[in-house]
Image (cartoon, rainbow, N blue to C red):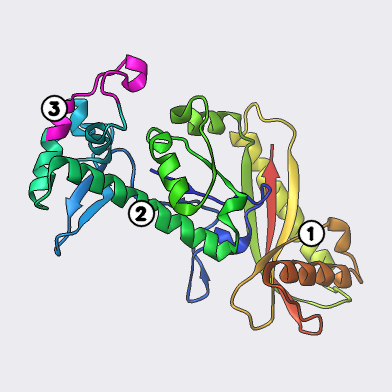
Amino acid sequence: MPHVTKSNGGIMPVAAARSQTAATLLSGPASGVIGAGGGSVAWVDDVGLPKVGPQSTGAEPGPACYGRGGKDATLTDAFVVSGFLDPERFLGGRMRLDRSLAEAAIARFAGRLAMTPDEAAESIVRVAVSNMYAEFTKILSRAAVDPRDFALVAFGGAGPVVGALVAREVGISAVFVPRSPGTLCALGALSADIVNDAVRTVHTRVESALLEAAALRRQYDALRAELGEWLERFGDGAGAAAFRHAADMRYVGQSYEIDVPVELDWLAPGGGAVLLAAFHRAHERAFGHADREAPAEVVNLRVQLRA
């Protein structure tokens, strides 16, 4: 199943990391997920239009061409019928796909659309690519970036099959295919740093004098201690821990916050001016403007552990 993430130097901005309904923070950092994988089922909606996903056959029984009892037409079956996949060389020849079963499943689907099997297989691929294109364009539009400045990394079981098709639709000229695309996620999980975030809501108005400096520092100390205990329990074999301190800040009256990196030595009497200056700079980078005369506040304190 495709996942869409815009890299931002390792730090995902708050605007990209949340879903917001009625000014309520619903989720933390997440990738955009498109319901169209190799096992995604092709179906026809009430008005007679072809759809792909989010229903999936999964690995068991899998696509019809696996020969494990699957009957529904899937994206993988469409790849076989359209010639994107060679049934004799799937998984380096270690697994054979049954083209006749794929053709039978696609033919049943085609009958509901008054299409030939070849036309139906092509429509399945086109719909799946269109789903991915729609998600890409939403993310690129929100981030106000030019797709020509990016490369597409095609991984996962079916990613390299559709990588060039999606890149062409989006306007990306470079596609990177890892050596072992099907196991890239597992490799990443094994080699990635251990990361955990701790958050505490404080709702504190920030003034230049920063009279709350000692209280804020105690909150950060408590968050680091919480993460340290977590690492002792679950971080067996982890390397040395590093902590990143940040604050979710906003102008008073705003319904959204932005992530502002914080240095602990700012949390001293009179340190509010430095914290406010950092917030104004972050707001200007994110939105193109800042109001240095408007009051600001800290909504949440955040500490990220990386080991």
Q: In the rendered image, is residue 69 in sight?
A: no
Residue 46 place in picture, x, y as percent: 14, 63
**Pick the front one: 115 or 37:** 115
Q: Which of marks 3 and 1 is in front?
A: 3
Image-based side of 68 in relation to 244, left or right: left
Which sits earlier in the primary sequence, circle 3 or circle 1?
A: 3
**Pick the front one: 181 or 200:** 181
**Numbered disc 3: secondary structure:** helix
Q: Residues within 10 Å of mark 3 (few under 14, many from 20)?
A: some
- The quadrant of the rendering that contains the C terminus is top right
Residue 196 place in picture, x, y as percent: 62, 45
Q: What distance separates the C-alpha of mark 1 from that of mark 2?
A: 39 Å
Which residue is pictured at 14% across the width and 33% down the height?
Answer: 103
Residue 99 place in picture, x, y as percent: 18, 26
- The quadrant of the rendering that contains the N terminus is top left
Q: Which residue is label 2 attached to?
A: 131
- Relative to 257, say whether 195 is above or below: above
The verdict on residue 55 being magenta is no
Which residue is pictured at 29% across the width and 45% down the height?
Answer: 125
**Pick the front one: 215 or 86:** 86
Which residue is pictured at 72% across the width and 71% down the height?
Answer: 283
Q: Which residue is label 1 attached to?
A: 262
Q: Nearer the viewer, mark 1 or mark 2?
A: 2
Amino acid type, residue under disc 1 in the picture: Val
Q: Which region is colored magenta?
A: 86-103
Which sits earlier in the primary sequence, circle 1 or circle 2?
A: 2
- Give the tally of numbered discs: 3
- Relative to 281, say whether 183 is above or below: above
Image-based side of 172 in relation to 107, left or right: right
Q: In the rendered image, is residue 208 in sight?
A: yes
Q: Which residue is label 3 attached to?
A: 100
